[in-house]
């Protein structure tokens, strides 16, 4: 799999998971405090940046 | 354009050229085929409606999407072009990504109740981030200093340093990057300290203590300033004297090893004028090279070194003075070696038949990778090149023939009573 595709896939999955959590929170299935939303957002951004940076180093 | 290229061109990409911040909305507008203003207005509405969460989505898109014009298969370019300024490289992305993951973990622990206190943890996190930035800056500066070539004492090696080729400078972070990293690191550490003191209601006391420390420091500086200034001056003069002493020692050692030894030999061989002249000539050559700062090169290293070595050999063997002036240099391959051999033969002839009392034989060479040119000139009695017997191979075969076999040419110019000049030219395709 090309390097860019892997990063895009990871980014897409991470953003999808974040979006799913927000949707579930909005639907009332789960209850997310500001802390959990902040943690999820930070984790999403962090994963995208980490995979991007590490993937760049393999080229 | 094939299907893959069409597919790539239809992907949603940021439009950095037409965007205001990162080109996310401009890229979206282009993908949808609508006016970017409409998309931007809709984004503003979304930010208000979602309480700011749309900004997070913008940041995610910025990080995840490549910009228009970036070739496919390249790394994620989402963080380039922030405000047209910062270019965040691979290392920074890994560091920031890891830091964000750590932040996410801390926030999760906090939500789970596995927590010490906000007053302790957040200042520690800020301080750790600032310390990491300052450590990295200090480490990268130290690596640049170690890679820099050693400083040669100025005075004794001034002529040498002027001609010695210096190593290319080590890669150095830009001043803006250094300022950014250092300033941001210091700000984080100071911010962490203030946050800790503030959350523990100790800011007022810290302010008083800081004021006390500042006043005491200023008083001490006023008292010690003259002493410190004198100390600094003494240290500088001591360092300069030490450098001068080292230079004198180096100069004395060189003169002892070269000139004194030669003078001693000349005294021992004073009854052999030819040997004395050879010794003197050799020492003169060595001193001239040392004064001009020529690097020590072996004859096999380059065309110029080989030519000079050949001239020195003829000089020693024939007891004549030969002056060599060389401009440029080139590698020593078979063609260049042929030119050197032809020049050696021309020098031998000049030494045998063209050496005039007191007038040295001169060699002028211009060398480049695509052209070699050598002139050998003497002020001897000269000769008629057309009158050279056919069985004398010195000029025809060793000089003219050799050059022609390697794709060059040799021209001998001489008239009786007007000295002689041999021109050797070799042009070749650049490597």
Image: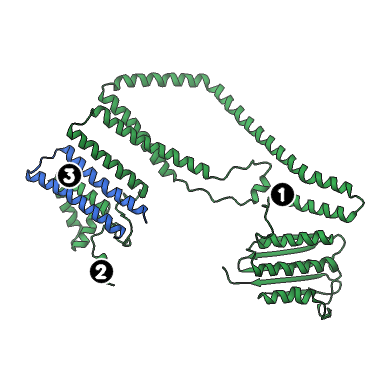
The disc label shown at residue B6, or none: 2
Q: Residue at x 23, y 44 (%)?
A: A43
Task: Measure the C-alpha gap from mark 1 to mark 3.
Answer: 72 Å
Nearest to the observer: residue B129 or residue B62: B129
Quadrant the C terminus of chain B occupies: bottom right
The disc label shown at residue B352, or none: none
10 Å crowding of disc 2: few (<14), some (14-19), many (20+): few
Q: How is the image coloured?
A: by chain
Chain designation of label 3: B
| Contact, mark 1 vs mark 2 (Cβ under 8 Å) | no
Task: Measure the C-alpha gap from mark 3 to mark 2.
Answer: 35 Å
Chain designation of label 2: B
Quadrant housing residue B11? bottom left
Q: Tell me the SS state at disc 2.
A: helix
Q: Which badge, 1 or 3, is on the more N-terminal residue? A: 3
Tell me residue B253's x, y (percent).
74, 40
10 Å crowding of disc 3: few (<14), some (14-19), many (20+): few
Q: Colour of chain A?
A: blue
Height in image: B217 above or below B191?
A: above
Quadrant the N terminus of chain B occupies: bottom left
In the displayed structure image, the side of residue B34 where residue B143 appears, left or right: right
For label 1, the residue is B290
Q: Residue at x 10, y 42 (%)?
A: A30
Height in image: B231 above or below B138?
A: above
For label 3, the residue is B52
Q: Tell me the SS state at disc 3.
A: loop
In the displayed structure image, the side of residue B361 where residue A11 appears, left or right: left
Q: Which badge, 1 or 2, is on the more N-terminal residue? A: 2
Residue closest to the far right: B271
Asked whether residue B81 appears in the rendered view, the answer is: no
Q: Which badge, 3 or 2, is on the more N-terminal residue? A: 2
**Chain given the colour green:** B
């Amino acid at each position: 799999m090309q390097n860019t595709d892997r990063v895009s896939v990871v980014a897409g999955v991470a953003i999808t998971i974040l979006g799913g959590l927000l949707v579930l929170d909005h639907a009332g299935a789960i209850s997310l405090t500001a802390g959990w939303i902040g943690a999820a957002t930070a984790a999403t951004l962090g994963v995208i940046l980490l995979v991007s940076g590490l993937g760049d180093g393999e080229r | 354009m094939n299907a893959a290229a069409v597919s790539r061109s239809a992907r949603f990409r940021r439009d950095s050229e037409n965007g205001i911040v990162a080109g996310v909305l401009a890229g979206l507008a282009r993908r949808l085929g609508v006016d970017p203003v409409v998309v931007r207005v809709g984004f503003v509405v979304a930010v208000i409606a979602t309480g700011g969460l749309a900004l997070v989505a913008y940041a995610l898109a910025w990080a995840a999407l490549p910009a228009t014009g970036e070739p496919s298969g390249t790394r994620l370019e989402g963080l380039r072009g922030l405000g047209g300024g910062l270019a965040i490289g691979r290392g920074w992305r890994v560091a920031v990504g890891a830091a964000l993951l750590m932040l996410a973990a801390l926030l999760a622990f906090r939500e789970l109740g596995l927590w010490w206190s906000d007053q302790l943890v957040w200042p520690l996190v800020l301080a750790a981030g600032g310390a990491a930035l300052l450590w990295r800056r200090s480490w990268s500066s130290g690596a640049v200093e170690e890679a820099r070539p050693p400083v040669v004492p100025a005075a004794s090696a001034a002529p040498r340093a002027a001609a010695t080729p210096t190593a290319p400078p080590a890669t150095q972070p830009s001043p803006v990057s250094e300022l950014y990293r250092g300033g941001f690191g210091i700000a984080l550490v100071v911010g962490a300290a203030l946050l800790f003191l503030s959350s523990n209601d100790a800011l007022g006391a810290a302010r008083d203590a800081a004021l006390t420390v500042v006043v005491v420091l200023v008083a001490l500086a006023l008292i010690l300033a003259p002493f410190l200034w004198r100390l600094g001056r003494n240290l500088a003069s001591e360092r300069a004297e030490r450098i001068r002493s080292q230079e004198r020692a180096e100069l004395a050692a060189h003169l002892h090893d070269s000139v004194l030894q030669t003078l001693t030999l000349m005294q021992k061989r004073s009854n052999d004028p030819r040997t004395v002249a050879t010794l003197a000539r050799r020492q003169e050559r060595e001193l001239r090279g040392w004064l001009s700062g020529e690097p020590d090169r072996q004859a096999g290293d380059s065309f110029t070194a080989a030519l000079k070595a050949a001239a020195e050999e003829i000089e020693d063997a024939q007891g004549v003075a030969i002056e060599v002036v060389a401009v440029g240099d080139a590698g020593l391959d078979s063609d260049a070696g042929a030119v050197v051999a032809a020049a050696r033969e021309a020098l031998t002839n000049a030494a045998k038949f063209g050496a005039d009392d007191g007038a040295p034989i001169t060699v002028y060479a211009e060398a480049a990778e695509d052209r070699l040119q050598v002139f050998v000139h003497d002020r001897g009695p000269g000769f008629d090149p057309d009158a050279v017997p056919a069985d004398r191979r010195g000029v025809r075969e060793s000089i003219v023939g050799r050059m022609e076999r390697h794709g060059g040419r040799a021209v001998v110019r001489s008239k009786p009573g007007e000295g002689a000049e041999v021109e050797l030219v070799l042009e070749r395709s650049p490597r």
